[in-house]
Image (cartoon, grey):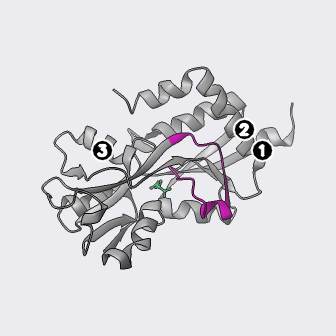
Amino acid sequence: GDTASDDKVYLIACDAKYAPFSFEENGTYKGIDVELLDAIAKTEGFKYELKPMDFSAVIPGITSGQLDGAIAGMSITDERKQSLDFSEGYFESGLSIVVNANNTDINSEADLQSKSASIKKGTAGSQFAEDNTDKYGLKLNYFDDSPTMFLDVENGNSDFLLEDYPVIAYKIKVDGDSKLRIAGDKLYTVDYGFAVKKDDNQELLKMFNDGLKKIKEDGTYDKIVGQYVGE
Ligand code: GLN
């Protein structure tokens, strides 16, 4: 129908530099988050404008009402549920310790004592480091995006960084002869969710969940994810 709601353009954030979930290539954004959102929007018939930004700006943008939602490799956490509503989990992730490829002495969480950490502002990784600063005597070095956080450990400035497993695994695969190494098992497993402000934009949340279900059933989800992860 020709109603006002047909003209609604949702402003939806993604992380500007977060391959394989969202990244710019030849002037366009691609990746799992970007392509799932686009497929879901087409299936459900809603319009959106993609707003790539630093992750630290995403949650404040949603809670202040400047953004309608976000698909930003965002981990579903109980703390965030106080201010956000999440979709069903759309991707299983988790947090990894990452070191310089030349490092031999960090192989698990137990080896973090008195080390320096490269972390990305506003993330679940930075939360883990902050929660464990006193326990391990960590020194924290903050960055705005993943590529600059990676460089800090590649250049030997920080001893380790914290990044989501699928993101660092993809980077190491794409790098080939990578300067980074994943140290040990994931610290925890967590799902990514599409997020809106708590009790707000519920129609958008429902469309996301409905569309996600449909693109899982018709094979579109597997096709998108399979371009970036898997064999
Ligand atoms: N999954 C992590 C979080 O939710 C990191 C997200 C990101 O860096 N885009 O904090």
Q: Position of residue 136 (x, y in %)?
A: 32, 74
Q: Position of residue 173 (x, y in %)?
A: 26, 38
Check disc 2 and report the residue beneath it: 207
Position of 134 relative to 111 (above/below): below
Position of 51 relative to 120 (above/below): above
Q: Closest to the observer: 219 or 10? A: 219
Mark 3 neighbour density, 10 Å: few (under 14) some (14–19) many (20 or more) = some
Check disc 1 and report the residue beneath it: 203
Which residue is at a point 41% across and 28% down the rendered structure image?
A: 227
Mark 2 neighbour density, 10 Å: few (under 14) some (14–19) many (20 or more) = some
Instruction: Please indicate, yes or no, whether residue 10 appears anywhere in the rendered image.
Output: yes
Residues in magenta, as a range: 73-91
Which residue is at a point 27% across and 58% down the rendered structure image?
A: 108
Q: CA distance from mark 2 to mark 1?
A: 6 Å
Are the residues flagged by discs 2 and 1 in contact, CB closer than 8 Å?
yes
Q: Position of residue 200 (x, y in %)?
A: 76, 56
Q: Quadrant of the N terminus?
A: top right
Label 3 CB sits under 8 Å from any ligand 1 atom: no
Q: Closest to the observer: 71 or 136? A: 136
Q: Within the image, what quadrant is residue 141 found in?
A: bottom left
